[in-house]
Structure formats: C-alpha cells, structure tokens
Image (cartoon, rainbow, N blue to C red):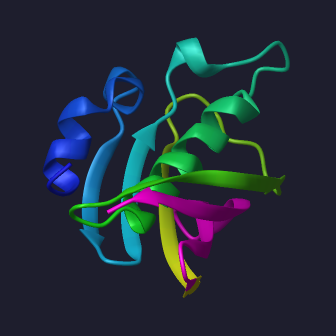
Amino acid sequence: MNGPADMLAADKASSALGITLAEVRDGYALLRMTVTENMINGHGIAHGGYVFLLADSAFAYACNRAGSVTVAASADVDFLLPAHEGDELEAEAVERTRFGRSGIYDVTVRRGSEVVAEFRGRSRTLRS
C-alpha cells in the first residue's frame, strides 16, 4: 500500500456503502456516509453495524501510513443516539497514542453537531 488513495481504491466495503474520504493525514481521518434505506433495522433506525463500520473505516485510514499494513487489534463502540434514513454521518478519527507497533485511536461519529457514537480502536502494525 502506498497511501490513502490506494487503500480507498481497494476498500470495497466502504465504497459499496457510499463512504467518502473527506480528509486524511497521519493519525487523522474524516469520513462521511449517508444512511440509506438498506441500512435501517427492524426498529426503524440505522443498524449499529453500519455505524460501527463507518467508525472502523475512519480508524483504518487514521492508523495506516504509507508503506505499512496496520489492522485492528480490538475495538469497542458506545451508541449514544440513533441515526435515521437520510442522515449524513461524519466519523472523525484521531490518534491518541502510538507506541512500537501499537496505537490507540478515538473516533467520534456525528450527525451535524450531535454525537451518535464514540468508538475506540487499538491498532497493530503487521509490517512496514
């Protein structure tokens, strides 16, 4: 992988959901996704798996650097507000710390100024 553009081109999951990359730099990423009809669960709100996927994708872009392969070692999410069909969600990932081949990243998923979810990911770099 040479960088975010290569990663985006190969990221079929994010592309299939219409996720777009607004900004990326070492330790930071901002992604957007509109909640579609196919993302709605039986309660009439966005399925949490899609919200998690958006946050996880932002985490991936924030922790991968040119010339390295970094994956999730673990992650957890707190869902704070429901998202609805038509909502444009924004996931902002920020590196909190990087040590050796490991790192910790926080991702906030927002709908406008409202926080929909908070995600924490722990990364592991496999190779450079």
Judge by depth and name the residue closer to the eye, 117 or 95.
95
With 7 as the anchor, is 2 left or right in this view? left
Q: Which picture quadrant has residue 66?
A: bottom left
Q: Which residues are magenta?
A: 99-128
Residue 83 visible here:
yes
Q: Residue at the location (30% across, 67% down)?
A: 65
39 drawn magenta: no
Point out the image quarter for the C terminus: bottom left
Residue 109 visible here:
no
Residue 27 screen position, x and y as percent: 41, 78
Judge by depth and name the residue closer to the eye, 108 or 123.
123
Q: Residue at the location (59% across, 62% down)?
A: 123
In the rendered picture of this protein, how many numbered marks are placed on residues? Answer: 0
Q: Residue at the location (39% across, 75% down)?
A: 28
Residue 47 screen position, x and y as percent: 72, 27
With 6 as the anchor, is 92 left or right in this view? right
- Residue 38 vs 117, above or below: the answer is above
- Residue 99 vs 57, above or below: the answer is below
Q: Which picture quadrant has residue 108?
A: bottom right
Secondary structure mainly formed by the magenta segment: strand
Residue 41 screen position, x and y as percent: 75, 17
Residue 85 screen position, x and y as percent: 57, 28
- Residue 79 vs 49, above or below: the answer is below
With 123 as the anchor, is 14 left or right in this view? left
